[in-house]
């Protein structure tokens, strides 16, 4: 019985100091659906070689992650094998781009998947895979030896379970050049994964020179410690503290006592000197004489000071009395003068006030001597010259800073574009999209205040457009080949082609309203009109169906069904009750699978089925098991699943009457007006015609990934298409023209 453990994953990595060994550890953050089906992906990758592309290691890991989770409908083993097989193919591409010979010998990689308590992993190169349980260390790979296949890496996948008390350690072998396995194991025994990861990191930080990049991942039970063994800031053991108390502290106290002895000696020296001075007779006589003379001098000065203060006091008293008596009149006079000045100023107009200021300045200037005038004018000139010079310098400095910032922005945008191109080389589409989106934002904020800057912006926009075309796999078709133009040269004859179909080695075109059937000869491109029954009603839908041995079945506005074999038209007669039931519906599209017809009714929002027995068709039944919105559905196609496309660009998938999860890669611009969708059980692709986007779009229907977008300004009235997968060509109906494009 397996234990239900909460699993913890911790990692770190460092690159070498001499920049010739690069490591990256990726721990994925899958969506709930991805985690439930494919688990959590962890990757360690190391390259011991000089590389051309910045972030190559990150690109490799992102590519593996993206490919792995693209197989969401598969199981873990299949997705892992598919991803590793794809990576084996890319090795040669990386060698060519990076100019690295024999990359396999320089590459070390470990790919790990964790789902619940189970672990799946495979590795190549100098990677250690250890199981740590208590103090035991088991090398997993040595115990599961499998012969190496020299033609590819990742030749075996190991599967196991994480049990209570055990930890898996995956690491580049270079880790153990600096940290012993036993130390890691002992630390884990008394701690948890988080603390052990930090312990390893700190051990490596203490090393001065790391020759090779190091990456490490620890996987095990999430354990919360009740009591930490040691505080992070307290690295002193009990023995170290005991040694400190016995040896270091007494020594410190001894050192402290040394300066205290010095101060004691100094104090005794001063006391002895003071005592010898106090016993000197001549010095004592001099001091006593000085005291006596000072006392007599102070007495004389005191008497004289009293007399002067008495005389001066009487004079000051009189003056102070006069001063305080005059204060009221002085204040009153000042207030009156101030009031009068304010009244005069208030009466002045701005012009008069300016004239007064001007006159005062002129008067002041006239009174200056010639020398002072020259000095004054010189000072004014110097001040203005300095201000102008400073302003010019300031503007130049700002211009230099702005230009440097502009050049930095240009270089940064170019570096982003280069990195995006590198991501495309390794099929890392999500990373390329993110980078080019950042570049687009930065380009939009560039200044265009000069012709040169306008040209720079245009160049960057053009480069961004080229990269976006690669990201979204856009193929621009400037002059598509016209296979046939069915427009009538006679104004009296109206032609409106609605449908093209290829069967019996011929291409046919159909005009629903005018009941026009046309056969186009591929070699001569001649158009042959086929005579039809004039009594036919307007055609509503048609398609090649398997229930009629690959002939065409169509239905008219009266819900009568007919077959067309390339030359003649035949009516299909249903039982009256069956025909009555069919007449309740308004059919907009027809398709088939095996001996069953599938008919789309957008008004009643339903898909109907009519099965064919040995001879005749049976009754009409609703295929859907639950209600669904088919109001805006424009087209449907079948390969065992039914796919529907809406005019707003939404594509949905159904199986046995129920909707199934289905998503396509997001493209730019988004799908907006789908006029037709097509696939069958002989192709892995799904084809879409987007009228508003003027494009023919191809997706991989298994992964939802974009294969290509074929865009042309000539695609201005798109209606229908046919794909010849054997010839790798598509025939596009645009108005009454049929274009031929190579896929």
Image: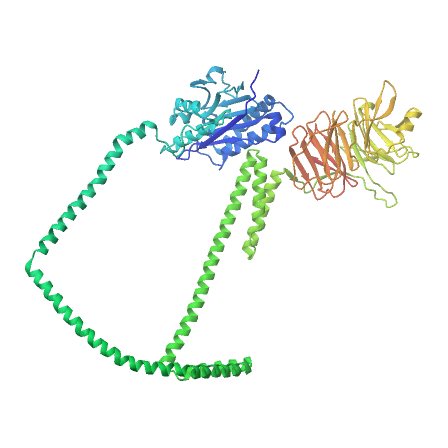
User: In x, y percent, where is residue 326?
Assistant: 40, 83
Question: Quick check: can you spot residue 47?
Answer: no
User: In x, y percent, where is residue 720?
Assistant: 77, 36
Task: Point out the residue furthest to the left here.
Answer: 281
Kindly indicate the quadrant of the structure image that contains residue 384.
Answer: bottom left
The quarter of the image holding the N terminus is top right
- Relative to residue 619, is residue 323 drawn left or right? left
- Relative to residue 545, is residue 23 drawn left or right? left
Question: Quick check: can you spot residue 33?
Answer: yes
The quarter of the image holding the C terminus is top right
675 versus 302 height, above or below:
above
479 versus 342 height, above or below:
above
Kindly indicate the quadrant of the structure image that contains residue 375.
Answer: bottom left
Query: Is 462 or 439 nearer to us in this picture?
Result: 439
User: In x, y percent, where is residue 614?
Assistant: 86, 17
The structure residue drawn at horizontal position 63% and vertical position 37%, both measured from the top left corner, is: 473
Query: Is 350 or 432 nearer to us in this picture?
Result: 350
- Relative to residue 688, is residue 272 drawn left or right? left
Query: Is 584 or 679 nearer to us in this picture?
Result: 584
User: In x, y percent, where is residue 35?
Assistant: 60, 28
């Amino acid at each position: 019985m397996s234990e239900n453990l909460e699993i913890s994953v911790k990692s770190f990595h460092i690159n070498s100091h001499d920049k010739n060994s690069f490591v990256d550890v990726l721990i994925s953050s899958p969506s709930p659906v991805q985690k439930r089906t494919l688990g959590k992906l962890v990757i360690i990758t190391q390259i011991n070689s000089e590389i051309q592309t910045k972030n190559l290691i990150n690109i490799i890991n992102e590519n593996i992650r993206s490919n792995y989770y693209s197989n969401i409908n598969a199981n873990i083993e299949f997705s892992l094998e598919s991803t590793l097989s794809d990576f084996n193919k890319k090795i040669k591409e990386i060698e060519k781009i990076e100019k690295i010979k024999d990359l396999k010998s320089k590459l070390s990689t470990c790919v790990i998947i964790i789902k619940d308590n189970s672990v799946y992993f495979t590795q190549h190169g100098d990677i250690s895979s250890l199981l740590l349980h208590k103090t035991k260390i088991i090398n997993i790979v040595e115990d599961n030896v499998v012969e190496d296949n020299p033609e590819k890496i990742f030749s075996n996948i190991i599967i196991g379970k994480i049990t209570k008390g055990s930890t898996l350690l995956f690491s580049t072998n270079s880790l153990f050049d600096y940290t012993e396995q036993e130390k890691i194991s002992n630390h884990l025994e008394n701690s948890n994964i988080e603390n052990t990861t930090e312990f390893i990191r700190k051990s490596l930080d203490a090393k001065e020179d790391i020759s090779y990049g190091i990456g490490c991942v620890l996987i095990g039970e999430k354990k919360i410690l009740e009591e930490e063994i040691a505080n992070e800031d307290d690295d002193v053991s009990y023995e170290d503290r005991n040694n400190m108390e016995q040896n270091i502290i007494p020594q410190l106290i001894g050192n402290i006592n040394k300066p205290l002895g010095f101060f004691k000696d100094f104090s005794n020296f001063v006391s002895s000197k003071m005592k010898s001075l106090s016993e000197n007779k001549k010095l004592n006589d001099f001091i006593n004489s000085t005291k006596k003379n000072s006392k007599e001098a102070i007495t004389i000065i005191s008497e004289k000071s009293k007399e002067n203060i008495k005389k001066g006091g009487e004079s000051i008293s009189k003056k102070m009395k006069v001063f305080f008596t005059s204060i009221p009149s002085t204040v009153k006079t000042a207030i009156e003068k101030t009031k009068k000045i304010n009244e005069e100023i208030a009466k002045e107009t701005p012009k008069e006030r300016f004239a007064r200021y001007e006159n005062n300045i002129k008067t002041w200037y006239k009174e200056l001597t010639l020398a002072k005038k020259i000095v004054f004018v010189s000072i004014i000139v110097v001040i203005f010259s300095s201000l102008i010079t400073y302003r010019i310098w300031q503007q130049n400095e700002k211009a230099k800073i702005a230009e440097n910032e502009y050049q930095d922005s240009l270089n940064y945008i170019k570096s982003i574009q280069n990195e995006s191109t590198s991501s495309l080389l390794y099929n890392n589409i999500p990373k390329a999209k993110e980078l080019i989106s950042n570049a687009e934002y930065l380009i939009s904020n560039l200044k265009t205040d000069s012709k040169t800057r306008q040209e720079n912006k245009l160049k960057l926009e053009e480069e961004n457009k080229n990269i976006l075309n690669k990201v979204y796999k856009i193929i621009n078709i400037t002059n598509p080949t016209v296979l046939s133009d069915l427009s009538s040269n006679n104004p009296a004859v109206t032609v409106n082609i609605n449908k093209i179909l290829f069967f019996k080695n011929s291409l046919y075109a159909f005009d629903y309203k005018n009941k026009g059937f046309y056969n186009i000869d591929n070699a001569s491109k001649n158009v042959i009109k086929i005579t039809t029954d004039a009594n036919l009603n307007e055609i509503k839908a048609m398609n090649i169906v398997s229930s009629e041995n690959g002939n065409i079945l169509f239905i008219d506005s009266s819900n009568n069904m007919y077959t067309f074999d390339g030359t003649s038209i035949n009516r299909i007669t249903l039982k009256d009750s069956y025909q009555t039931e069919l007449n309740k519906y308004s059919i907009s599209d027809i398709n088939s699978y095996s001996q069953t017809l599938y008919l789309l009714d957008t008004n009643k929002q339903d898909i109907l089925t009519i099965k064919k027995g040995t001879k005749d068709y049976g009754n009409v039944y609703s295929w859907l098991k639950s209600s669904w919105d088919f109001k805006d559905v424009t087209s449907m196609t079948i390969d065992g699943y039914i796919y529907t496309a809406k005019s707003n660009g939404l594509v949905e998938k159904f199986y046995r009457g129920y909707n199934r999860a289905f998503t396509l890669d997001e493209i730019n611009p988004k799908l907006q007006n789908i006029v037709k969708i097509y696939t069958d059980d002989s192709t892995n692709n799904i084809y879409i015609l987007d009228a508003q986007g003027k494009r023919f779009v191809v997706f991989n229907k298994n992964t939802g990934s974009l294969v290509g977008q074929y865009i042309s300004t000539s695609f201005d009235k798109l209606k229908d298409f046919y794909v010849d997968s054997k010839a790798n060509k598509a025939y596009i109906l645009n108005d009454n023209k049929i274009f031929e494009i190579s896929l």
